[in-house]
């Protein structure tokens, strides 16, 4: 003991002299040596002359034994005893607690950078009044060296918060939101399943009762996969996970080091990509740091190649992102950052992760008790915290080097983003991972025969050859084009067939978007115990055409322009048939199960 509740040389050295034992002078070390003999009797605040005399006697003995010379002895005698006690350092209490759990002993070695630790603590404290006004009381931040993984700053919570101060949010399992989407993207590229720029499908989707929606409740029809990742669209991500496989992806996530995903793939289902599983900020930061380290060291591993990681980081590099309200925000950064945000269901967790060749930073903002608030959003809270922390970091304006030996130039269809087919009219050359060679060729370009002014389609067998025009069309299926066309005025619609001169088309005239064929549907009752309706939807190549709807041969009505029909079918099997003005027909069979109880 060294007086009061101070135990151990390390703690006493900081308490009395505000320095580590290795930096003590001869006078300071001598005082520390005599203090434990009777700290309750002789202390810096009690019997100071007696303590000084004991110190000086020890210095005399050191001189007599030759441990110090005359100059050191005389200089030591001139040093006064400490007049005040210093507060013990408490800059990373949550990290110290983590080290205590992981390591034996009383002295721990860390790579915490005091300047970065203190500056980042001030950043959290500066944000706190704004968050507190929105009833957001907690946050966590972790800063790692990308190359080594060393922890240079660790904040398990906001230093000045009064709510759940000692809860370490860096180690707390929380719903992941969208923060895992880049890992799915990277693995798809690595396995040659996608090209980064190919169109992803973004339409109303129903999968075994699961109906994912984008945050802004709208659909783009089709969007390049890298843009879907940047905008964090839910529907494309769910459809991609369905194709990739939940069980397979879950295995990959565990191998990456996400230790809290302990349930089965059936338990998580497709919601895994939207926050159906819980992760910790610690695991998350280390996963992305290791990806960055692979690029810095230019090495592949068993999980991902450097080319797949580089392409993923390239997709995540843009500073402009839509927030949860659909408004675009542009982050301010002195250097390029690969970053991703996430917001969990119910606004309970806001995440952000960013990687540069120098540092990896992960942030979480929310309430430790799990209470959701509208202000808990990825871009607006955790994202702003992320870039404020990056702004205090001492790093150069550099970026990861492209792994050119694992990348090649590919000819890509400009409209679809797939490898070009022989009929794609416009192409571009892009440097992409070699795995793109295994992806599909463009499925959306078709050759059609029309008259000279392209007002009608014709069959070569019923017109003179000189009246034919062979034209290549970029043609999306109607269930996709319905949502794609409003934001793409350049989209060229297929002209209708000429009367009595039609042929089979590789693209159907119309397609149901809901219900799915053979689907079992549960129609609940509302709060008034009234049966809710089923909203059937169909997409037609000619949007303005008129459609006629029939349920079990009973006429329901007609639609124009917006093709949806509200129906209230009884329990059992049903057939829904739709016919257009030219006699084209399509139908769906579905089953209505016994209604859910309110």
Image (cartoon, rainbow, N blue to C red):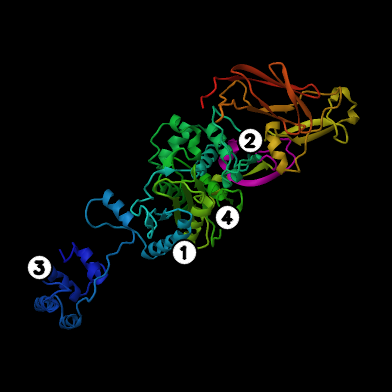
Where disc 1 sits, the SS reads loop
In the image, the segment drawn in magenta is 414-440
In percent of width and height, residue 54 lies at 10, 76
Can residue 497 be found in the magenta stretch?
Answer: no
Which mark identifies residue 138?
A: none
In the image, taking residue 550 as reference, residue 165 lies left or right, namely left
In percent of width and height, residue 17 lies at 24, 71
Residue 180 seen in the figure? yes
Q: Mark 3 touching mark 1, by CB under 8 A?
A: no
Where disc 4 sits, the SS reads loop
Could you tell me which residue is drawn at 54 percent across and 60 percent down?
Answer: 333
Q: State how far apart marks 4 and 3 are (Cα).
A: 62 Å
Could you tell me which residue is drawn at 57 percent across and 43 percent down?
Answer: 215
Which mark identifies residue 319?
A: 4
Q: Earlier in the sequence, mark 4 or mark 3?
A: 3
Q: Earlier in the sequence, mark 2 or mark 4?
A: 2
Depth check, front residue: 426 or 359 = 359
In percent of width and height, residue 93 lies at 31, 57
In the image, taking residue 88 as reference, residue 495 lies left or right, namely right
Q: Dividing the picture into quarters, in which one does residue 540 lie?
A: top right
Q: In the rendered image, which residue does mark 3 sit on?
A: 37
Q: State how far apart marks 3 and 1 are (Cα).
A: 46 Å
Q: Mark 2 touching mark 1, by CB under 8 A?
A: no
Which mark identifies residue 203?
A: 2
């Amino acid at each position: 003991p060294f007086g009061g509740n101070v135990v151990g040389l390390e703690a006493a050295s900081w308490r009395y002299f505000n320095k580590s034992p290795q930096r003590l002078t001869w006078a300071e070390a001598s005082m520390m040596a005599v203090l434990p003999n009777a700290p309750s009797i002789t202390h810096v605040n009690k019997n100071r002359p007696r303590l000084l005399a004991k110190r000086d006697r020890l210095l005399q003995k050191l001189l007599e034994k030759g441990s110090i010379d005359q100059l050191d002895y005389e200089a030591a005698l001139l040093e006064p005893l400490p007049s005040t006690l210093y507060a013990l350092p408490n800059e990373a209490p949550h990290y110290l607690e983590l080290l205590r759990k992981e390591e034996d002993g009383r002295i721990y070695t860390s790579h915490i950078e005091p300047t970065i630790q203190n500056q980042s603590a001030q950043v959290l404290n500066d944000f706190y009044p704004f968050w507190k006004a929105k009833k957001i009381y907690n946050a966590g931040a972790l800063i790692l060296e990308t190359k080594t993984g060393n922890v240079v700053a660790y904040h398990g919570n906001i230093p000045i918060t009064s709510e759940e101060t000692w809860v370490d949010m860096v180690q707390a399992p929380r719903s992941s939101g969208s923060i895992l989407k880049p890992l799915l993207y990277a693995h798809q590229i690595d396995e040659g399943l996608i090209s980064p720029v190919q169109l992803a499908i973004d339409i109303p989707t129903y999968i075994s009762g699961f109906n994912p929606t984008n945050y802004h409740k709208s659909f783009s029809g089709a969007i390049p996969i890298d843009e879907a990742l940047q905008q964090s669209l839910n529907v494309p991500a769910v459809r991609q996970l369905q194709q990739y496989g939940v069980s397979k992806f879950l295995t990959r996530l565990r191998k990456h080091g996400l230790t809290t995903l302990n349930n089965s793939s059936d338990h998580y289902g497709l919601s895994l990509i939207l926050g159906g599983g819980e992760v910790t900020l610690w695991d998350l930061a280390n996963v992305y740091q290791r990806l960055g380290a692979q690029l810095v060291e230019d090495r592949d591993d068993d999980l991902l190649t450097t080319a797949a990681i580089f392409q993923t980081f390239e997709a995540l590099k843009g500073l402009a992102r839509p927030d949860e309200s659909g408004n675009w925000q542009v982050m301010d950064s002195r250097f390029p950052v690969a970053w991703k945000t996430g917001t969990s269901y119910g606004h309970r967790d806001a995440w952000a992760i960013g990687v540069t060749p120098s540092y990896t930073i992960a942030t979480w903002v929310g309430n430790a008790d799990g209470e959701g608030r509208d202000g808990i959003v990825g871009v607006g809270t955790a994202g702003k915290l992320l870039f404020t922390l990056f702004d205090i970091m001492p790093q150069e304006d550099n970026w990861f080097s492209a792994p050119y030996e694992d990348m090649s130039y590919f000819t890509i269809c400009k409209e679809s983003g797939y490898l070009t087919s022989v009929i794609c009219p416009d192409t571009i050359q892009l440097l992409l991972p070699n795995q793109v060679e295994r992806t599909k060729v463009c499925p959306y370009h078709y050759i059609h025969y029309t008259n000279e002014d392209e007002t009608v389609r014709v069959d070569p067998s019923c017109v003179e050859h000189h009246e034919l025009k062979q034209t290549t069309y970029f043609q999306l299926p109607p269930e996709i084009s319905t949502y794609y066309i409003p934001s793409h005025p350049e989209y060229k619609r297929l002209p209708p067939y000429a009367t009595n001169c039609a042929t089979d088309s590789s693209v159907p005239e119309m397609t149901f978007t809901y219900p799915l064929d053979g689907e079992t549907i549960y129609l609940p009752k509302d709060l008034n115990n009234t049966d809710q309706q089923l909203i059937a939807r169909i997409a037609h190549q000619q949007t303005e055409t008129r459609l006629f709807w029939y349920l079990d041969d009973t006429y329901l009505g007609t639609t124009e322009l917006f093709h949806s029909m509200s129906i209230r079918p009884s329990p059992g099997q049903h057939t829904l048939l739709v016919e257009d003005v030219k006699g084209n027909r399509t139908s769906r069979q579905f089953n209505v199960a016994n209604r859910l109880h309110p």
